[in-house]
Structures are given as structure tokens and as C-alpha cells.
Amino acid sequence: MKKKFWDFPWYAILFAVYPVLTLLAHNIGQVEYSVAYRALLVSVLASVFSVFILYFILRDWKKAGVLTVLWLLAFFFYGHVFGYVKGLEINGRVVGRHTYFMAVWLVLFLGIVWLTLKGSWQTALAPVLSTMSIVLVIFPLYQLVIYQYGISEKAQIVPPEISVQSVETSPDIYFIILDMYGRNDVLTEEFDYDDGPFLRQLKDMGFYVASCSQSNYHSTTYSLSATLNANYLNALSDQFTPENKDTALMWHLIQNSAVEAVLREHGYKVVAFETGYEWTEWEDADYFYTLQSTKINNFEDLLLRNSFPAVFSEKGYLDEYLLTSDQRKHDLSLYVLDELEKVPLLPGPKFVFVHLTIPHPPFVVGPNGEFEVVPPHYENNEDYYLKDEYKLGYRNQIAFLNMRIPQVFQAILENSARPPIIIVQGDHGPRFVKTDKQLDILNAYYFPQPQPELYPSMTPVNNFRLIFNTYFGASLPYLPDRSYVSELDKPYDFKEIPNDCTTDDK
């Protein structure tokens, strides 16, 4: 038994995982590890199955291992090699086509297989393949380890401790971010869209709408880092200096926030949802909702497009089995809102964090929730929208939210055992407007009794100071309402933007 174990060509499994690990390493930070799990499992199972089948036919572990490696190489590297000859012309005739290249590829593959079966050099080749497989796998693993080490280094930023008292009744807390949802006056003036009826619905349900609210920062990571830790960035760490360019510093503050910590200490269960962005996905939540699909995901599609199935993928034969990023965002947006209605039925006090990535582009949701894409333009591998297209897609997704959000809130209020706390706000405003207008946001609060004092220009940094003071017996001073912007090349060199909004609201 021990001899059979060591005779098994384990290097075949390493060759099977190498292409998947390499693609994951090249895209780490842009995708979750989970997108690669299915591809890894299928690759490993296919290689093991191949080795056993070939062994039972040939009765030779070495030949079974070498042949398995050969078809793995032929399968996974087909698309990469074809990329060098794609579109190649000879005497005005396009020969760089799958029709010709596939025939040549198959002839080469079968020729090498024949040589392998007829030759007797597998014994010498096996140790070479073993060494090669280990070396190949080390490179992507090294990239993944270095990435994780970098994340752990950023974890040296310690969220502040917040002291609150224990309470007998703990209301559920819903913190809902509608990414890039702007303020009513901006929507009216810049997008020819009036969400006044939506705001009146919220008010009729008991919400207070801060009609002059601005975000504290101009982008999601900045804004959520401050809100979930109840303070401005420069007060959270001395690493947020104008000289520092590492924007990933904020990820740890979102994933391990002071607000989450204090609520967990007081018996709250955390509820979170898939977002599509690693830094706002709280996978360690007590209840983490993710959209399940058996279709091919974007990562798997990219892997297949670089492999032999590119022959079929480029002709559209796999489209019906593919869940595109646009389709997934659409389905995920509807899924989150549907599941959010059921959250009140979960037992015990809950802190519910929702980062809904609409109305932020890409624009994939129509005004009635249908799958309706307003496609961007592409140039030099970058996408962009023309202003009119941006306005159309943005209005579509705002219209859908205006229809769906009141239904969700009504379900939450009706299904909650005791009146909850609900905060719904944009993390920042829309683009294609002046810089100062990009800070103007939707900001609405639903508070049970006793209701704290609210005001039109309130900003998100005071959200949880208000909650902890009102419902948890804390005595946290309220911070001045300030808003900041910075440039991409100097992410922490902040410029303050004053709030010039005026209102008659009380």
C-alpha cells in the first residue's frame, strides 16, 4: 500500500492546480478566493480521474502521470499559444484561426502521446515533472502569501474602543449603503430626476431625511472606514498622511470596525451580504448571504477563454451557461433586497450591514428591476461612459430603488418584534457633477423611541455616536460635520469642502 502511494504521480495534481492558482494570483484583490474553488476542485478531480483511468488501461503509473500532464498542458495552454497566432495572415489568407490551429494542436498532442506510449523514458521524466510542478506552483502561492501578508500588515491599524452600557432591550440596527446615491437637489438639477415622492414615502413611514447631508469623504472606502469607526481617518491612525499612497489601509477598518466590535460585545449577531467587493464583504458574519449560481462565473470564464474551450467560447456556444458580471450584479441586487425583507425573522438582536452597489455603475438594472444594461465604451482596456449614457443608467437604477426600497422597509417594520433602527444613505454622490456635488448624499434615519435630535446637515460620521448615546447609555461627543476630497495620486492629502446647502427643514 505504501509503495502504491508513492508510485502515484502526485505531480499531475500540481499541474492541474497551477493554471487556476496563477490566474487567481494575477487577479487577487479584484476577486474573492471563493471564485476559484470550483475550478480547483474540478481540475484536481479531473487529473486524479485521468491518472486512474490511464493506469487501469496501461498498468503503468509513470505513463499515466505523464499522459495526464500532457493533456492538462494541451488543455490549459491552448488559448495562451493561440493568442500569438490569432489573426495571422499568409499571402492575404487568415490562417490564425481556430479551425487551422486546433488541427495542428491536436496533431502535435497525439504525436507526443504516441511517443510517450512507445518510448521508455517516462522513468527519467517523472522526477523532472515532479520538480517542475513544485517550482511552478510555488510562484502563484508566493504571490498569494505576500498579498495576505500585506493585508495582515495593514491590520496594525487598530480600530478605536467605544464604551457603551448594557441595555435590556436591544433594537435591531440596519445600516444600508446605496452606493453613489445622491441628494435630491443634485438628482433634480444634474440628472433631471426628482426622487421627492420616494423621500415623502420614507417620511410617511417615520424616517427623518437629512435634506442637506454630505458624505464625509468622496469615495466608498474612505466613507465607510470613518462611519463604521465613528471618527475621521486622521483621528483613527497616524498612517493616514499625505505621503502615504496605500489606499488598502482602510480595508481593515471596514472589515474589523469598532462599531461591529462593540455590538458583538453586547450580544448582537452580525448579518451581511455579498457585495462583489472584497473589502465590504463580511464573510465572518453570523449570517452571510451570497448569491448561489451553478453557471460559469467570470473567473471560470476567463480560465476557459485561455484554455481549449476558447474554441467554443468565442463562438458563443457557452453563453447560455455563463453568468456574466453584469448579470450577476443585477441578480445580486435583487437577491439582497429580497433576502433583506426576511432578516427580521432571524432570532436575537441583529446588526445588519448592507452595501448595495447600485445606483453605482455598471448600469445593469432597469427602472422596474429588469436586466437592462447601459454599456460603457472601451478604449485602451479602460471603460468609460458618455454623460448622457451615465445619466440614463443612473436614473434607471435610482428609479428601481425608489420603487423597491419602501417595500423592503415596510416588510422590515412589519416583521420586526420591536421597532428597529434603520439608516439608509449614500456613501458618496454621483460622478459627472462638480466635485463638491459628489459629496451630496441621500441620508435618512428611522429611530424608535426615544428619538434623538436630528438636523438637516448631519453627516454619517456621527451615525453610531448618535445611536450609542441614545440607546446604549454612551456619552460620546458629536463631531463637527466635515467633508473631504483628495486626488488619486495623493489619497490622504485631504481638502475640505464646505457645505453651502440651505434648507427650511427643522
Image (cartoon, rainbow, N blue to C red):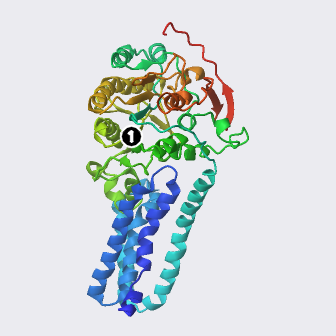
- Where the N terminus falls, by quadrant? bottom left
Three-letter amino acid code of the residue under disc 1: Lys
Where 96 sits versus 17, above or below? above
Q: Is residue 342 left or right of residue 89?
A: left
**Which is more toward the observer, 345 or 301?**
345
Using the rendered image of the protein, determine whether residue 84 is visible from the camera's viewpoint.
no
At mark 1, the secondary structure is strand
Q: How many marks?
A: 1
Identify the residue at the far top of this view.
504
Q: Is residue 122 left or right of residue 330?
A: right
**Which is more toward the observer, 4 or 160?**
160
Residue 353 x/y as whole percent: 42, 39
Where 208 sits versus 288, above or below? above
Q: Residue at x 45, y 74 (%)?
A: 14
Using the rendered image of the protein, determine whether residue 93 is visible from the camera's viewpoint.
yes
**Which is more toward the observer, 253 or 73?**
253
Residue 305 x/y as whole percent: 39, 56
Residue 129 x/y as whole percent: 48, 81
Where 486 sits versus 112, above or below? above
Residue 119 x/y as whole percent: 40, 90
Query: Residue 178: which quarter of the image?
Result: top left
Q: Mark 1 — residue?
A: 350
Question: Label 1 neighbourhood size at 10 Å, few (<14), some (14-19), many (20+)?
Answer: many
